[in-house]
Image (spheres, helix red, strand yellow):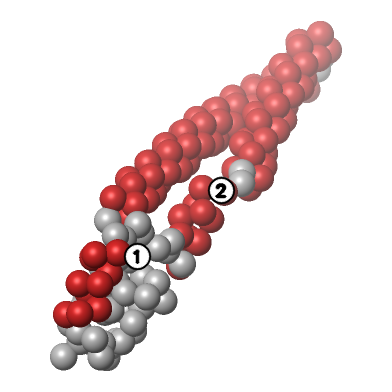
């Protein structure tokens, strides 16, 4: 019984760890997406300013290429920041996809095929004597009437198996 409780506690701990890491991943992704959105809004604003300045220069027939180049350089810098943020976001996704989850696999395996618990010989004999014609679990213990799981190893009991 203690083995089952230990496995449940370990499973809960693993679940909490996974939720924690996924929460951090979600937080980081959201923060970077927000930054990308802000950068794109800044880029759009600078593009509008560049267009307005170019229009005014055309209208007045007085071009100042230095001002236009400065705005273009500003846009180029924002584009670099967007590319860096998108790369950081891609790295977060790759790390998330590449994470191995050996503990989750271990839990699934233990749930599918529990190990027999340490049962004293006296307990096993008592279980057998209480219902000698009862169906047996794979661990050798008799299945108790109405049980859904073996009381000794924790394996699921097939429906209809009972000690009458």
Vertical comparison of 56 with 119: above or below: above
Quarter of the picture containing the N terminus is bottom left
Q: Nearer the viewer, residue 22 or 62?
A: 22
Quadrant for the C terminus, please: bottom left
Few, some or many residues within 10 Å of mark 2 (<14, 14–19, 20+)? few
Residue named by callout 2: 101
In the image, 73 versus 2, the foreground residue is 2
Separation of residues labelled 2 and 1 (CA atoms):
26 Å
Where residue 30 sits in the image (x, y, percent)?
A: 49, 36
Q: Is residue 98 above or below residue 74?
A: below
Q: Please name the residue shown 30% across and 64% down the image.
A: 121
Can you give x and y, in whole percent of width and height, for residue 133 in the image?
25, 91
Task: Please indicate, yes or no, whether residue 82 appears anywhere in the rendered image.
Answer: no
Q: Earlier in the sequence, mark 2 or mark 1?
A: 2
Tell whether 148 sits left or right of 15: left
The label nearer to you, 2 versus 1, is 1
| Among the 4 quarters of the image, the one containing residue 138 | bottom left
Give the quarter of the image for residue 40: top right
Point out residue 82 in the picture as x, y percentages from the top left corner.
67, 29
- On screen, residue 64 above or below 159: above
Front residue of 164/69: it is 164
Reading the image, the residue beneath label 1 is: 153
Helix or strand or loop: what does disc 1 sit on? loop
Q: Is residue 111 left or right of residue 42?
A: left
Number of numbered labels in the structure image? 2
């Amino acid at each position: 019984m203690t083995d089952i409780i230990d496995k449940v506690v370990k499973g809960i701990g693993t679940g909490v760890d996974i939720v924690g890491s996924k929460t951090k991943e979600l937080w980081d992704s959201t923060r970077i997406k927000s930054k990308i959105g802000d950068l794109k809004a800044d880029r759009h604003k600078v593009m509008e300013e560049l267009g307005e300045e170019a229009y005014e220069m055309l209208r007045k027939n007085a071009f100042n290429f230095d001002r236009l180049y400065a705005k273009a350089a500003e846009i180029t810098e924002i584009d670099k920041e967007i590319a860096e943020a998108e790369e950081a976001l891609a790295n977060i996704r790759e790390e998330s996809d590449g994470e191995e989850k050996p503990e989750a696999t271990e839990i699934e395996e233990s749930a599918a095929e529990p190990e027999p618990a340490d049962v004293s010989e006296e307990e096993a004999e008592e279980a057998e004597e209480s219902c000698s014609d009862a169906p047996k679990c794979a661990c050798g213990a008799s299945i108790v009437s109405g049980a859904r799981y073996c009381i000794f190893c924790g394996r699921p009991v097939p429906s209809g198996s009972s000690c009458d």
